[in-house]
Image (tube, helix red, strand yellow):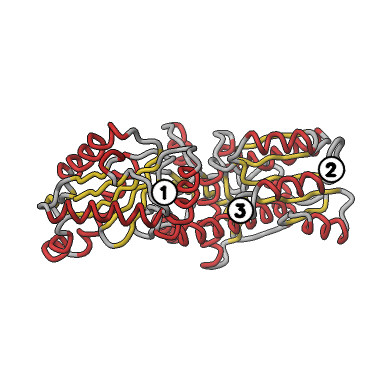
Amino acid sequence: MPRVLLVEDSRFFAATVRERIEDKLHFDVVHAPDMAQAKQILEQGGEFVAALLDLHLPDAPSGEVVDMVLGHGIPSIILTADYTDDARDTFWSKKIVDYVVKEGAHNLDYVVSMVERIHKNSDVTVLVAEDSSLARNTLCDLLRVHRFQVLEARDGQEAFRLLKQHKGVRMLITDYNMPRMDGFKLTKLARGEFGPDELVIIGVSAMGNNLLSAQFIKNGANDFLNKPFISEEFYCRVNQNLDMLEYIQTIKNYSNRDYLTGLHNRRSLFDTGEKLFAASCRGDLSLTVAMLDIDHFKSVNDTYGHEAGDLVLVAVSDYLRKRFRETDIVCRFGGEEFCILAVNMQPGELASVFESLRADIADMRVTFQGRNVSVTASIGVYAGGESTLEGMIREADSMLYEAKAGGRDQVRLALPDTVS
């Protein structure tokens, strides 16, 4: 479980912060009421996602705890009851994550969101395109404080090559005036390769004005920053744009994924499946369709309750996801029925693959309230040729009907040599 270090002398405030973090993020909060106990905790070792530090402790009244915790390489958020420009400048210069005033519930929610953001950032790659080594190093250092993975490019051409080479880049921060390829052209090319649900683009320039900002956005950028900027503004723009990207991806997932199991839904099955079917018609690949239905699923709900039924669906879904390859599509077709589009399966392997699948599901045990719940599945498989994807699914469904009519917990196949 990810851990957060909380150094706070107010037990009431500490209890409130701990409750918020544990309730919303399910992280483990390790509390120290003073600097001495915080030191003991750090000396015990172990990793922390972030540290929340009170500036005025009984044994560290002037923020001494900040240097100690930063010395252990832990991203640190300062919590304080007052806010002065001098204090702000002092602690931002130490490369903290953020500086939050203890004012109310909305500030606590912000602290929780920052802890979550820091935890996510270790899986987020940002590409910085900037020809000035000083400016590039400054941007990269700011990003690393927030635990981003950072790639660097000295011009637009190098940046575009890295974008195509590293498909996991989620944010591009690009200067305008660069040799070989400027920020406008890089933005236009990047947006042509990656949609708004895949990549955030932020333009930066010391030549900034309203026209330059508008041109960046017209070329596909999400945002624009004038140089020089303060750290707080930079982090706010980066975090808000990443949050928006994640919201878009979440909405997209909801439209293409089954909410309970996380598998493809019917819409996604047909959207992606039609492309696979077209490729199979061209002879680029072979396609097999399987329909799987959990036997007597209603009796599981009636005997154990719908919560147990949901656990069974999730368990079967997780198994199917692990059993099949990324090139295959596993879909919750409806209720307790699943559809599988398998690519390039050899006809001679189909019987053993799906018979093994059936046997493994029969051997599964789902524990619910101390009781073991077991199920079986009937499977229909079709590997023949049809004029449409819907036709292949209907044929596989016909095989499934035969399996259920024949006594359930069995596999029926229509292989190429048995298809008229």
- The residue singled out by tag 2 in the image is 182
Measured as percent of width and height from the top left, residue 275 is found at 50, 49
Image quadrant holding the N terminus, namely top left
Marking on residue 242: 3
Secondary structure under badge 2? loop
Q: Specify the amino acid type for callout 2.
A: Asp
Q: Specify the amino acid type for callout 3.
A: Leu
First in sequence: mark 1 or mark 3? 1
Mark 1 vs mark 3, foreground winner is 3
Residue 125 position (above or below residue 313)? above
404, 84: nearer the viewer: 404
- The residue singled out by tag 1 in the image is 29
Residue 156 is drawn in which quadrant?
top right
Mark 2 vs mark 1, foreground winner is 2
**Residue at the image position 64 percent from the left and 60 percent from the top:** 82
* Horizontal arrangement in the rendering, residue 85 relative to residue 148 (left or right): right
Q: Residues within 10 Å of mark 3 (few under 14, many from 20)?
A: some
412, 2: nearer the viewer: 412
First in sequence: mark 2 or mark 1? 1
